Amino acid sequence: MNPLRRLAGQTAIYGLSNILGRIINFLLVPLYTRVFIPEEYGIVTEMYVYVAFLLIVLTYGMETALFRFSENKGGNKDAVFSTAFLSVLLTSSLFIFLVISFRIPLAEAMRYGGHVYYIVLLALIVGLDAIAAIPYARLRVRNRPWRFALIRFSGIIVNIGLVLFFLVFCPWLIENGPEALVPVVEKIYNEQIGVGYVFVANLAATIITLLLLSPEMFRVKWNFDTILFRQMLIFALPLLVAGMAGWANEALDKLLLKYLLPENIAMEQLGIYGAVYKLSMLMTIFVQAYRFAAEPFFFAEASQKNARDMFALIMNYFIIGLLTIFLLITLFIDLVKHFIGPEFHEGISIVPVLLLANLFLGIYWNLSIWYKLTAKTHYGAWFAIIGACITLVLNIWWIPLFGYHGAAWATLVCYFSIALLSYLTGQKNYKIPYNIKRIGLLVTTAIGVHLLSKLTGSLPAAWMYPVHLAFVAMFLLAAAFIEPSLRRVIQQVRR
């Protein structure tokens, strides 16, 4: 159990900054959805869709390549890091230069001709974030989760602090502060910038993060190994394709909402969908925290005799965790919905669908370790491309008919499909003894508990919430019965 405890411990530490940061960002959603109308929040949603895509392009799989080549016996970890870092530094710097040079036509093409500075801020945020990604990955390779968490959390604090300063404190000072202070505040705050302050805060946080990561960049002997770079690129490029297609699976629906719905309602619908999507973030937070620790862990443990049995067991625990989150959110949705403004509540009905979609995305990610361990990363690219095709076809078909409801169901179908494909293909190439019956029973039980909770909708809140909490406990007891090893873990913890 030592490796499992180590994975759990590192997941907790890596997740500390990630979870706290995501929760703090999550707690900003009530602010955003009250300060901004749905159309304005749609801008935030759209711009961060582009950020996610461009980060994938600008890191082009080098993070995972860093893990892979750093674990090679006899390899020079410093040479691997410096080669990966220098390549990303060069390409990201070129990207920033090109986008700023062509900022005006880009802004007009994106319907932001009156806000060209959005494009400049976007380029700087993405380019600097991509450069920071490799030093972050090096901390994970070196098993420095606490330093990773501290740096990440520092950037989060700067981001949140500046958001509150520009969106809350400055307007309050202008309205209620001393008259002598108002001219000073107006020199640093312009009400017309509005949504732009979200991006200003993000850029400042990125710069602080990069400065804190600078020791990781300069404590190695800089060396660009051309042969090593070629090998890393061959390994990483399929991951780039997979990442781009994966982005399409995750984010293309948001862009298609803008362009497939009538222009007079498109940004409003996008804003509502983006805000409601945030409510499924708690599951995504867990998956991302787990990924930070699990990816290097799987590479490090793959050579152990019982590795595949351990990977299968980890999958069961992982799914139990995700399903518990699913129930906590859906059974208490009447409370959770108040995290977003009343103008956005009409989209609450799609939250269970989005949570199930994220469940299968988490399962797919866990399954994907087989093609990374066997260096058959082209399979990941094919799965993601197939998923992207499903996403594109279903969204083009369903969004004009059902709006964001169609986008949510398309996401679920996509992630279920690629998880199934990865499992079937993985069992032929790198067989891991996943217990499909137990996994199916766990998922079925959780969905059954969710449907059962619908019968209590007419109860007063004072009765309904305790009953729903009992339903969650009932699922956990059922999970302990379905997965016998979980009972042993609970007994050890109690001792």
Image (spheres, rainbow, N blue to C red):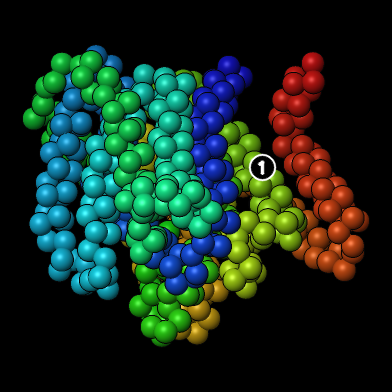
The answer to whether residue 482 of the structure is visible from this angle is no
| Residue at image mark 1 | 320
- Residue 366 vs 186, above or below: the answer is above
Q: Position of residue 426 (x, y in %)?
A: 44, 45
Q: Considering the image in quadrants, where does the C terminus appear?
A: top right
Q: Position of residue 285 (x, y in %)?
A: 53, 43
Q: Under tag 1, what secondary structure?
A: helix
Classify residue 24 by image quadrant.
top right
| Residue drawn at the location 38% of the way across and 75% of the way down | 258
| Residue drawn at the location 15% of the way across and 16% of the way down | 221
Residue 202 is left or right of residue 83, and the answer is: right
Q: Position of residue 297 (x, y in %)?
A: 45, 26
As drawn, the residue found furthest toward the front would be 180
| Residue drawn at the location 58% of the way across and 17% of the way down | 2
Q: How many dots with numbers?
A: 1
| Residue drawn at the location 11% of the way across and 46% of the way down | 94
- Residue 96 vs 114, above or below: the answer is above
Q: Position of residue 128 (x, y in %)?
A: 25, 41
The answer to whether residue 328 of the structure is visible from this angle is yes
Q: Amino acid at mark 1?
A: Ile
